Image: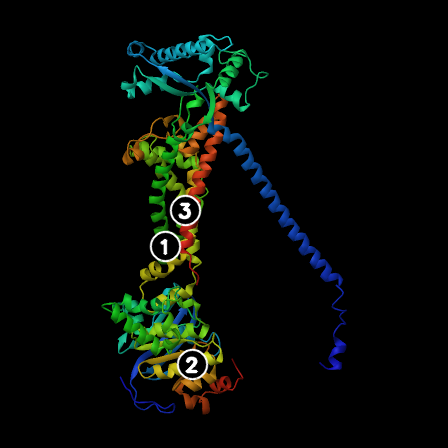
Amino acid sequence: MTDASMDNVPVKGSLTTVDARTKKRNAAEKRFKAYGLVAIMIGLFFLVVLAVSILRSGLPAFTQAEVRVEFTLTQAQFDEAESQMLKTKAYENFFIAALQSQLEERGLDVSFDPAAIERLLGKTGSTIREYFRENPDQIGTPVTFNLAASSRVDGYFKGRVSRDTVVDSRFLEVTDLDLVDALADAGIIITAFNWNFITGSDSGVDNPGGAGIGVSVIGSFFMMLVVLALSLPIGVAASIYLEEFAPQNWFTDLIEVNISNLAAVPSIVFGILGLAVFIQFMHLPQSAPLVGGLVLTLMTLPTIIISTRASLKSVPPSIREAALGVGASKMQTVFHHVLPLAAPGILTGTIIGLAQALGETAPLLLIGMVGFIARAYPEGVVSGFIDPNSAMPAQIYTWAARADAGFYEKAWGGIIILLIFLLTMNIIAIILRRRFERRW
Amino acid sequence: MYDIPHHTQETAVTDVKIKAKDVQVYYGNNHAIKDVSVEIENNTVTAFIGPSGCGKSTFLRCLNRMNDTIDICRVEGDILIDGDDIYDKRVDPVQLRAKVGMVFQKPNPFPKSIYDNIAYGPRIHGMARNKAELDDIVERALRRGAIWDEVKDRLQAPGTGLSGGQQQRLCIARAVATEPEVLLMDEPCSALDPIATAQVEELIDELRQNYAVVIVTHSMQQAARVSQKTAFFHLGNLVEYDDTSKIFTNPEDSRTESYITGRIG
C-alpha cells in the first residue's frame, strides 16, 4: 500500500488494545451465552425435580407389606366355604382363625382379636380361594401364603401412616399398630418386593395391595403393535406419494393443510370418532386394544407424515438427479436412493409418534379401555388384540382417581413402568437409526 | 461407430445424432429458450458456451428430458435423436436416459460403494446376467472413466470418500456404464482443480470415439481445448453455432465476439 492511500483510512489502534465497539460486541456474546446456560440449567433443574418426585412417590409401589403364614385348609372347610353365599369371606375367616391360633401358640404378648387381624389383612379370601380351586391336591397340606397386608398397614411401613395420623375407623385402630409391630418383630409381617405390581392385573377399589400393571402393559404392547403396523406403512406411503409423485395443485395443497391441522386436533376428538366409527358403526369389540390401536393410528399418522416428508425433502436433489440420470425410474429413484437416506428421519418421526400414542389416555377412556377392565391376561395373540383390556396411561389414570391412598403410590409406580417402556422403545429406535445412518 | 481419429479442426466425416428444431422452453411464464435449432453430430464434442442464465444448461437438460422433473417447465418444438422425437408420447424417459447419459456440475456419487455406484445402472437395466458379467461391466466403465487404477483395490469403499476429481470421474464412469450413445455434461469441471480438470478433459476427448458428447462450460479455454463444435447461447437464443475454430477465431456475430473477448458475460 502506498502512503497516499493510507491517508484516507481511519487510523486503527494497536491490536493489543480492545476498542469500545469490540468490547460491546464481546459483552453481548457473553450475555447471550449466559442466557443459554441459564435456560439449560432451568430445564435440567425441572427434569431432576420431576425424576426425583416420580422416583420418591413411585418406588414404594414396588414393595409391599406382606403377611407370611403357613396355613392348612381341610377338605371339610373347603366344602363348607364353597357352599356359602360369601365364599371369599368364609376363606378369610378360616385364615384368620388359623393365624390367630398360631399367634396364641407363639405366645405373643399382645392383645388381638379376629376383628383386629381382619383389619390388618388385605383381600386375602379371594387369593386363597383361587389357589385351592386351581390346586385341589393341596387341600389338607400346609401351604405358606404371602398375603398382602391392608393398605393402612402397608402405609405404616412406608411412613404414609403413623400413630399420630391414624384415626380410629373400621379400617384401622391405633391399638392395631401394636399388633402390627409385634407381628413384624415375629417375622410374620415382612416387607417384600412386590412382583405382583409388575405382573399382576388391576384389583378392586378396596384392594390396592393386589393391584398390578402387568395386564395393561400387555394391552399397551398390543396397541403399539397395531399403531406401528398401520401408521408406519400408511404414513410413509402417503408421504412418498405427496412428496415425490403428486402434482402440485390446489387439491394436494388442501390435503397438506388438512394433514397439518389433523396433527393439532385434540386427542379426545379422535376418541369420540373411534367410538362412533369403529365401535358403533363397524361393531368392533369394545375396550379392545385393536380399536385403541386404530384410534391412536389416526392420531399418529399426521406426525409420521409430517416428519417423513421433512426427511424426504432433506435428501439432496443431486442424488435424485444422479439416479434419474442413469435411467432409474421415479419409483426406483425413491426406493433405492431417497428412502434409505431418509430412513433415520422417518424412524425419528415414527418413534415420536409412537411415544405420543403410548402416553395417550383420553381417547382410550372413550372407547372403554379404562383401567378396571384389565383383570386378566389375554389367552393368546388374537385375544390380545380383541379381548377387553386397558393400557398403561388409562390404568394410571384409573388408579389416580381412586380414593385409597395406596392407589396413589401405584399410579406413580405405573408412571415409572410407563417411562421404562418408553425408554426401551427409544433405545430400539436409536439402535435402528445407527444402522440406517449413512453420510452423503 | 466411427473409429477415425478426429482432429480438432476436422468435422468432415460425421452424421447427425441429435437434431433440434425450433425448441422453446418455458418456466411458467418465463420464456427461457427461444427458437433453438441445432444439429449435434456423432463422435464429436459439442460445447455450449454463454453467460450465466443464457439457457445452455436448460437446453442440455431437454436432451434427456431431465426437465420433466420440474413441474412448471414446458418444452415445445422437436428434438430428434436418431430420427425419433424424444418428446413423443410413446417415449419413456427412462429408456431415453439409458441412451443419453448425463454428468452433473457437482460430483454426485451415490452414498454407496464405488462398485455399487457403477453397477447400479447396469443392474436396473438388466445388462448383466451374472456377477462375473457385472464385474466386467464395472471394470470396463471404471477404465473408461480413467479411474480404475486408483480404485481397483477398494471397490467396496464408499464412493463419497474419494476426492472431488475422482468423484467426478466416478460419475462419468457411472454414466458410461449403461452404454449410452450420447453423453451430456453440465459444467463437469467447475468444481475441480486444474489437475483434475486436465484429467477429465483428456477423458472427454477419449469418450468422443464412442459417443456424441455435449458439454456445457463456462471456460472458453476449455471449450476451445476439448470441442470440435461450439454453440454460443445468449439470453435464451442460440446466437451462433459452428466449428470451434471458427467461433474462436472468426465469429460471425458481434455478440459472440464480445463474449469470447470478455466484453459481455
Chain-order first, disc 1 or disc 3 = 1
Q: Can you give x and y, in whole percent of width and height, for residue A335 in the image? A: 33, 58
Q: Can you give x and y, in whole percent of width and height, for residue A98 in the image? A: 39, 11
| Residue at 40% from the left image edge and 9% from the top image edge | A97
Q: Which of pointers 1 and 3 indicates the residue nearer the eye?
A: 3
Q: Is residue A390 left or right of residue A116?
A: left
Q: Amino acid at mark 3?
A: Ile
Determine the chain carrying the residue at label 2.
Answer: B
Q: Which residue matches tag 1?
A: A240
Q: Amino acid at mark 1?
A: Ile
Viewer-side residue, B130 vs A29: B130
Determine the chain carrying the residue at label 3.
Answer: A
Rendered image: mark on residue A51: none
Q: Amino acid at mark 2?
A: Gln
What is the distance, in whole Å, between disc 1 and disc 3 at their CAs? 24 Å
Tell whether label 1 touches label 2 (CB within 8 Å): no
Q: Can you give x and y, in whole percent of width and height, for residue B93 in the image? A: 30, 68
Viewer-side residue, B206 vs B232: B206
Q: Is residue A251 left or right of residue B82?
A: right
Q: Is residue A392 left or right of residue A138?
A: right
| Residue at 58% from the left image edge and 43% from the top image edge | A44
Q: Which residue matches tag 2?
A: B199
Q: Which residue matches tag 3?
A: A428
Viewer-side residue, A420 vs A331: A420
